[in-house]
Image (cartoon, rainbow, N blue to C red):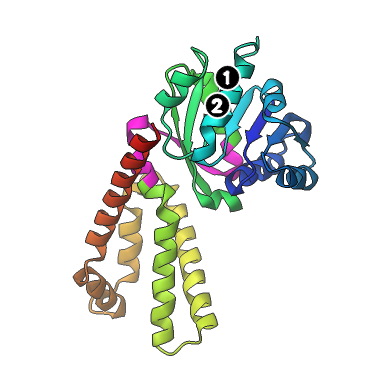
Amino acid sequence: MTTIAVIGGGRIGEALLSGLLASGRAARDIVVSEKMQERAAELSRRFGIRAMSLRDAAESADVVVVATKPGDVAAVVDGLVEVMEVSDREKTVVSLAAGLTLGWYEAKLPAGTPVVRVMPNTPMLVNEGMCVISPGRYAADQHVDVVVELLKPVGRVLTVGEQMMDAVTAVSGSGPAYFYLVAEAMIDAAVKLGFPRDSAAELVVQTMAGSATMLQRALEDKASSATAPNQLRYAVTSPGGTTAAGIAALEQNGLRASFFEALEAARDRSVELGKQSN
């Protein structure tokens, strides 16, 4: 069985640990390393896994998941290099840290190290994440397959070329925040219409949850997946009805153009941050 070391005990690292254990992976095959000792002890107690130093965690693992903040990655990689240079055991390095390219890792790690870059998103905290992966030049199919199996318990997994990662960051990485902003705006609008805020929140959130479920089921039908949002919208929109009036107002106020601009702005910022990090 593959042994996994998760380096970093933040929310994303914790979500991955939870998903791995919930999927049936044995606690003895998972270790965590976290520079804050109290946090490391907390994760060890909660999940029944071993908390180790970076060196010990890296030595024990077949797969090392770097789930720290970007500013801490360089120190982590320096520690990995010290272990990997004297190890006779191949280790796959998986990066969940934003902005750092495959080339950055490959230049620092021992030659030939398989590296897989991952852009997760926060819904992985409830096992509904969208994780997008890009394999490095030394990552063969078997390495990619291992990473896909690690991430499946916390949501869906898609593989793309690294040149798409900045766009992925804009769409699914930042996407939850756009979704929450729309929910917030709808709740505020419902309050203006006269609803108490608690009732407004229940109306909006359940409507979004139900609509997302319907859309997900439609997307699973490959024959109609590309047009599913359009088809479902048409099904709700009667000619000359209330929904048509509301959608017309949204379009007149530039909703679609605003999303185009938002995603482009997020993509461009991701490119800038990547250049700064590298």
User: Where is residue 230 shown, x and y percent of the image?
Assistant: 30, 58
- Give yes or no for contact between labels 1 and 2 (Cβ–Cβ under 8 Å): yes
Which quadrant would the C terminus be assigned to in this image? top left
List the residue tagged with mark 1: 81
Q: State the CA–CA distance, disc 1 to disc 2.
A: 6 Å
Q: Residue at x 53, y 42 (%)?
A: 69
Residue 2 visible in the snapshot: no
Q: Dot 2: what SS?
A: helix
Q: Residue at x 45, y 64 (%)?
A: 180
Which residue extends farthest left? 252
User: Where is residue 120 shown, x and y percent of the image?
Assistant: 49, 43
Q: Residue at x 50, y 39 (%)?
A: 71
Which quadrant would the N terminus be assigned to in this image? top right
Closer to us: 147 or 97? 97
Image check: 182 left or right of 210? left
**SS assignment for the magenta stretch, majority:** helix
User: Where is residue 166 shown, x and y percent of the image?
Assistant: 35, 40
Q: Which residues are magenta?
A: 151-169
* Amino acid type, label 2: Val
User: Residue 160 lies in magenta, yes or no?
Assistant: yes
User: Residue 27 lies in magenta, yes or no?
Assistant: no
The correct choice, above or below, for 127 with respect to 185 in the image is: above
Q: Residue at x 50, y 70 (%)?
A: 205
* Quarter of the rendering containing residue 268: top left
Image check: 262 left or right of 15? left
Task: Specify the label residue 235 is tagged with.
Answer: none
Count residues near mark 2 (Cα–Cα under 10 Å), then give few for <14, some for 14-19, many for 20+: some
List the residue tagged with mark 2: 77
The correct choice, above or below, for 245 with respect to 16 in the image is: below
Which residue extends farthest bottom? 194
